[in-house]
Amino acid sequence: MQNQGASGSSGPLTNEEYDRIYQVIYGVLEDRANLPHACMFFAIAGSYLFNKVHKIAARPVAGAMLLCTEAPVGAPPNVLCIGKQDQGKISFDENNFHMWVQTEHHIVDFHSPLFGDGVKGPFTVPRKRFQKARTSEAQTLDLSQAGDWFMLPDPDLSTHFTDLFMERPSSVDLLKAVDAWYKPFPAPLAKMALLDNYGKVEPLRLAAPAAVGNW
């Protein structure tokens, strides 16, 4: 399944459908998580909605990611590495990793509009959607054009993090909130609120920084 056309998307979702999932997950996590580093929740919640609501088989996958964010003329490309990078070698561990959604034909990352918020470096990362056909992945680590990407997945780490997530009652409660609030675009969202740790009612809102364009 692939939507293409006026929305500019080349993935399984239109831009509007992608934005709705991204916005709902962000809205549930706002003030409840470290959003620039919440890729695990975005991946697990995104996979859940793919399977339950959009009827697209998907799973959360963990590992490392490389993304060329800019290729200035006459200068080396800017390459974002989410994981571990040492002397040209890419790896990951339980403290340095990324997590995304994988379908049969696509990689979808609902956390990508927030990449720049977690970057400590000399370059900025645009707030763009990431939906890529798996066949478009670079064959080597030599990423030279903006939008070039490379993933280093690990099935064992993926299972470990998913199991760990599901063992945390607070994470499961927030996942249930995503499930209860989410409606696919263009259906309107009902008003919904969550209780904080002190019993205060906090209305959910769609306030995520807008994604502008696609990788």
Image (cartoon, rainbow, N blue to C red):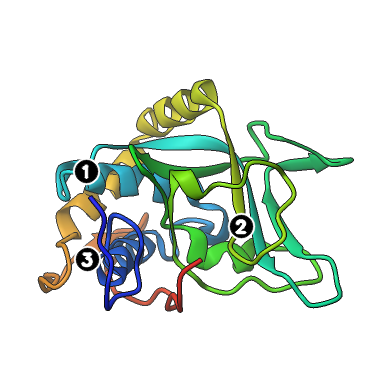
Left or right of 56, for residue 210: right
- Which of 195 and 10 lies nearest the eye of the viewer? 10
Q: Earlier in the sequence, mark 2 or mark 3?
A: 2
- Disc 3 is placed on an element classified as strand
Query: Which percent across, then down, holds residue 110?
Result: 41, 57
Res. 77 mark: none
Question: What is the CA distance from the residue labelled 2 to the residue labelled 1?
Answer: 25 Å
Camera-nearest label, 3 or 1: 1
Q: Check disc 2 and give the amino acid type.
A: Asp
Dot placed on the residue nearer the N-terminal end, 3 or 1? 1
Which residue corresponds to the image point at 55% horizontal and 27% vertical from the top-left? 154
* Amino acid at the residue labelled 1: Ile
Which residue position holds label 2? 148
Which residue is drawn at the image coordinates 24% and 37% (left, top)?
A: 57
Looking at the picture, tell me which residue is in the foreground, 76 or 40: 76
Q: Which residue position is annotated with label 3? A: 193
Q: What x and y, as percent, mark residue 102?
A: 39, 41
Q: Nearer the viewer, mark 2 or mark 3?
A: 2
Task: Give the class, few, some or many, for how many residues have Cα within 10 Å of label 1's Cα (few <14, many ≥20).
Answer: some
Q: Secondary structure at mark 2?
A: loop
Q: Amino acid at mark 3?
A: Ala
Q: Position of residue 143 (x, y in %)?
A: 70, 54
Residue 5 sits in which quadrant? bottom left
Coordinates of residue 43 in the picture (x, y in percent):
41, 46
Is disc 3 in contact with disc 1, using a CB cutoff of under 8 Å?
no
User: Callout 1: helix, strand or loop?
Assistant: loop
Q: Is residue 41 visible?
A: no
**Which residue appears farthest toward the right when viewing the image?**
87
